[in-house]
Image: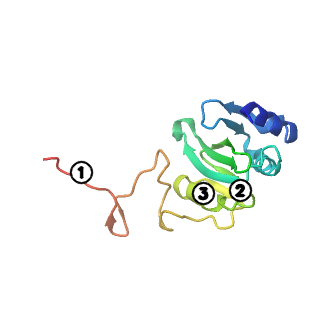
Amino acid sequence: MEIAEFKTLVQDRIGEAAVIGVDENATPKALLIAPDYIKDVCLYLRDNDQSYFDMLSCLTAIDNGPEINTMEVVYNLYSIPLEQSLMLKVTLDRDKPEIDSMTELWKTADWHEREAYDLFGVQFVGHPDLRRILMPGDWQGHPMRKDYVEPEEYRGMKTIREEEDPS
């Protein structure tokens, strides 16, 4: 199925407002989804016989930086029986990056969402156990944010390496 067909499929069922654009440059091509519709769109694409995206192969976040003041959550969906892929992108306010959890739809969302929370600070509403997965539980900040400043030490250990003398 082509990207235009996915767009029509979603808009016919969920509504015109659900899909706010298409990213033709993404691989695979991406539907840009309005944040309030992401869970309905994912549920429909999972359960529809024409799409049957039975697998969330990846979920990640992108920090567009404080200048643009947005973040994105990117969902890579795959249908094993239909051998087709689709990317969904949702743009969020960087000051309050919050979106519905997909853990009810795909079990793999659990760890993917925890990683996006840990590294970017994205809040996944309804996640059953949203806590850090890579960084220590008491770590301050989210290391993949563009304005993140690494602490000089953590629990008495230096965290910043000193430059080695090249000679």
Residue 135 position within the rendered picture, expressed as x and y whole percent measured from the top left: 48, 63
Which numbered disc flags the more N-terminal residue, 1 or 3? 3
| Residue contact between numbered discs 2 and 1, judged by CB atoms under 8 Å | no
Left or right: 56 as drawn, with respect to 6: left
**Amino acid marked by disc 1:** Glu
Would you place residue 93 above or below residue 105 in this image?
A: above
Q: Position of residue 58 (x, y in %)?
A: 61, 51
Q: Residue lying furthest left in this view? A: 167
Hey, which quadrant is residue 27 in on the image? top right
Question: Percent x, y for residue 48?
Answer: 83, 47
Q: Which residue is mark 2?
A: 102
Dot label at residue 112:
3
**Three-letter amino acid code of the residue under disc 3:** His
User: For mark 1, what is the residue?
Assistant: 163
Q: Nearer the viewer, residue 81 or 24?
A: 81
Neighbourhood count class around disc 1 (C-alpha, 10 Å): few under 14, some 14–19, many 20 upward: few
Q: Is residue 151 above or below residue 13?
A: below
What element does badge 3 sit on?
helix
Query: Which of the two discs, 2 and 1, sits closer to the camera?
Result: 2
- The reply to whether discs 2 and 3 touch (Cβ–Cβ < 8 Å) is no
Residue extending farthest to the right is: 13
Q: Quadrant of the N terminus?
A: top right
Q: Are marks 1 and 3 in contact (CB under 8 Å)?
A: no
